[in-house]
Image (tube, rainbow, N blue to C red):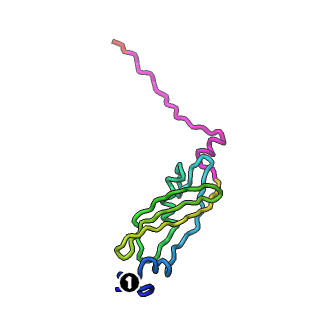
Amino acid sequence: MFCPKCGKKGGGLCFSCALEEHPIRFGKLCLEVCGCGSVRRGREWVSGLENVLESVTLGLVGFPPGVSVRGVKVSSVERGKKVKWDASFRLTYCGEEHVEVVHCRVDVAGKTCPSCGKKSARYYEAILQVRENPPLFVP
């Protein structure tokens, strides 16, 4: 069989023609980042931007039908008002493996995480344990 678009030998539409026909989609996303470096992921705050970028990348980038993602590796992160990084995807299409490098970019919103909010409000918690003295040994 040949690719109906370009004539390459293979089993139907080749990978490059599939990307031309159905380009990679990018979703809109805004990361909430605290001054201490924590990033909000769902309802929880996670320390370190690098710990969140792989899951953010998988949710941000959409591939054409028939393409399955085998893995993603994030590299060269630049921070500022926008976070920019390169993501290297290992993809499978029609039984063949491909590597695709995608340049990702998301907006950053400055927020305060709960622990920094408590520190700025001078809120402290402690656990106080009150115990009874053991009775003295009386013969």
Q: Nearer the viewer, residue 112 or 37?
A: 37
Magenta stretch, residue numbers: 111-136
- Is residue 12 a member of the stretch shown in magenta? no
Q: Nearer the viewer, residue 112 or 129?
A: 112
- Residue appearing at x 46%, y 27% in the figure: 131
Q: Quadrant of residue 107?
A: bottom right
Compared to residue 102, the image places residue 94 above or below, namely: below
Query: x, y (%) of residue 136?
Result: 40, 16
Q: Quadrant of residue 96?
A: bottom left
Query: x, y (%) of residue 101?
Result: 49, 66
Query: x, y (%) of residue 75?
Result: 50, 57
Disc 1 residue type? Gly
- Residue appearing at x 62%, y 43% in the figure: 118
Q: Secondary structure at mark 1?
A: loop
Q: Which residue is mark 1?
A: 12
Compared to residue 86, the image places residue 12 above or below, namely: below
- Residue appearing at x 61%, y 50% in the figure: 34
- Is residue 117 a member of the stretch shown in magenta? yes
Answer with left or right where residue 57 lies relative to residue 2. Answer: right
- Residue appearing at x 50%, y 65% in the figure: 59
Query: In what quadrant of the picture does the C terminus appear?
Result: top left
Query: In what quadrant of the picture does the N terminus appear?
Result: bottom left
Query: x, y (%) of residue 52?
Result: 51, 56
Compared to residue 6, the image places residue 129 above or below, namely: above
Mark 1: give few (<14), some (14-19) or many (20+) Cα within 10 Å: some
Q: Nearer the viewer, residue 105 or 1?
A: 1
Report the magenta stretch's main SS.
loop
How many marks on residues?
1
Q: Nearer the viewer, residue 75 or 135?
A: 75
The extreme top residue here reads 139
